[in-house]
Amino acid sequence: MEKKHILRSVNQDMARKSVLENFKEDEMLVERDWAMKFIPMQYRESQSNWFGKRGLNWHVSVATFKYRQALTMITVIHIFDSAPQDAETSNAVLENSLEIFHQINPCLTNAYIRSDNPGCFHGAASVCAMPFLSSIVQCKRMDFADPQGGKSICDRKAAHVKSYIRRYVNEGNDVCTAVDFKNALMKSNKDSVSGCCTSTS
């Protein structure tokens, strides 16, 4: 790894640490990422059905905020049957996520946004839209993780979600559409997933 990657990673990690250590009751850190496409899963699947699958696009947003002096995390997942991973879609997802976080905790009115480095996040269309995304929650700052800076909290949450989906499929169910995906998570939410909201489009 080159020195510039190390310096960038350290700098961005310090920015995240600074936000977490100086949280106010009305602030949150929102980390977001497009997860790898979800490949439809069937309980009983023929070999012919296994080939030629089209993955579902899904987006993970994780908000960290202070609630009663303790750090709390809420995860919002957007799953699409078909959607481009562009700046417009990413901005719409972020706007909806901010509204959901505010509904969960009405005190949250300021957000620090952190993401990795795809063009849909750091392009001009995405950055310029930040001040106008929400009339309730103000985006105070954007940070970007280094491309070689390791996995984020979004990747860890996505791994948890995929494990619950696999368990749901092993119970005799199919997960082939966005609605199936949401139903699987809602069932898991009753059993063992906490602090997770889902939305389909």
Image (spheres, grey):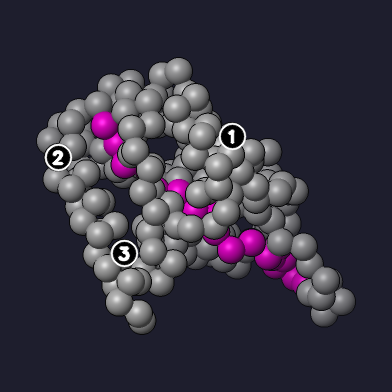
- Residue in the foreground of this view, choosing between 166 and 126: 126
Judged from this view, the residue extending furthest toward the top is 135
- Residue in the foreground of this view, choosing between 90 and 55: 90
Judged from this view, the residue extending furthest toward the right is 48
Q: What number is the disc on residue 92?
A: 1
Earlier-in-chain disc, 2 versus 3:
3
Q: What number is the disc on residue 22?
A: 2
- Which is closer to the viewer, label 2 or label 3? 3
Quadrant occupied by the N terminus: bottom left
Query: Which stretch appears magenta?
Result: 27-46
Earlier-in-chain disc, 3 versus 1:
3
Amino acid type at image mark 1: Ala
Residue 201 is inside the magenta segment: no
At mark 3, the secondary structure is: helix
Q: Say which residue label 3 marks.
A: 8
- Is any atom of residue 182 visible in this view? no
User: What x and y, as percent, mark residue 200?
Assistant: 64, 40
